Amino acid sequence: MDGHDADNTKQSAADMTAFVQNLLQQMQSRFQTMSESIMGKIDEMGNRIDELEQSINDLRAEMGQEGSPSPSTPLKGKDGSKSAEDN
C-alpha cells in the first residue's frame, strides 16, 4: 500500500464513522420523538380512565340516591338500548 491508498482508507474510515454517527443521532432523535408521543398517549389514556372512574362513581352515587332498580327491570343506555351485559 502506498501513501495514497492509506489516505483513501483513512478518509473512507472517517466517512463511515461520520455516516454511522449521523445515523445513530437520527435514530436517537426518532426514538426520543416516539417515546414522547407514547408517554403523551399514556398520560391522555390515564386522564380518560380517571374521567371514566369519576363518571362511574357519579352514576353509583346517583343510583344510590334513586334506589336500586328491581332485578326484572333491565338497565338501559343513554340511547335507550340494552347494554351488552343485559343480553
Image (cartoon, rainbow, N blue to C red):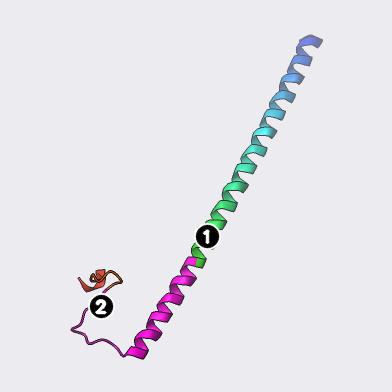
Residue 34 inside the magenta-drawn segment: no
Of all residues shown, which one is farthest toward the right?
A: 3
- Image point (38%, 85%), residue name: 62
- How far from the left and from the top, in percent, is residue 44? 52, 61
The residue pinned by badge 1 equals 42
Label whose residue precedes the other's in the sequence (1 or 2): 1
Residue 65 inside the magenta-drawn segment: yes
The crowding category of the residue bearing disc 2, from other C-alpha atoms within 10 Å (few below 14, some 14 to 19, many at least 20), is some
- Quarter assignment of residue 56: bottom left
Quarter of the image that includes the N terminus: top right
Please tell me which residue lies in front, 35 or 48: 48
- Image point (56%, 52%), residue name: 37
- Image point (67%, 38%), residue name: 25
- Image point (28%, 69%), residue name: 79
Is 76 drawn above or below residue 30 in the view shown?
below
Amino acid marked by disc 1: Ile
The residue pinned by badge 2 equals 75
- How far from the left and from the top, in percent, is residue 74? 21, 78
- SS under mark 1: helix
Please tell me which residue lies in front, 30 or 45: 45
Q: Main secondary structure of the magenta part?
A: helix
Is 77 drawn above or below residue 10 in the view shown?
below
Distance (Cα) linking label 1 and label 2: 32 Å
Is 66 drawn above or below residue 80 in the view shown?
below
Of all residues shown, which one is farthest toward the left?
A: 72
The crowding category of the residue bearing disc 1, from other C-alpha atoms within 10 Å (few below 14, some 14 to 19, many at least 20), is few
Q: Is residue 4 left or right of residue 22?
A: right
Amino acid marked by disc 2: Leu
- How far from the left and from the top, in percent, is residue 20? 67, 31
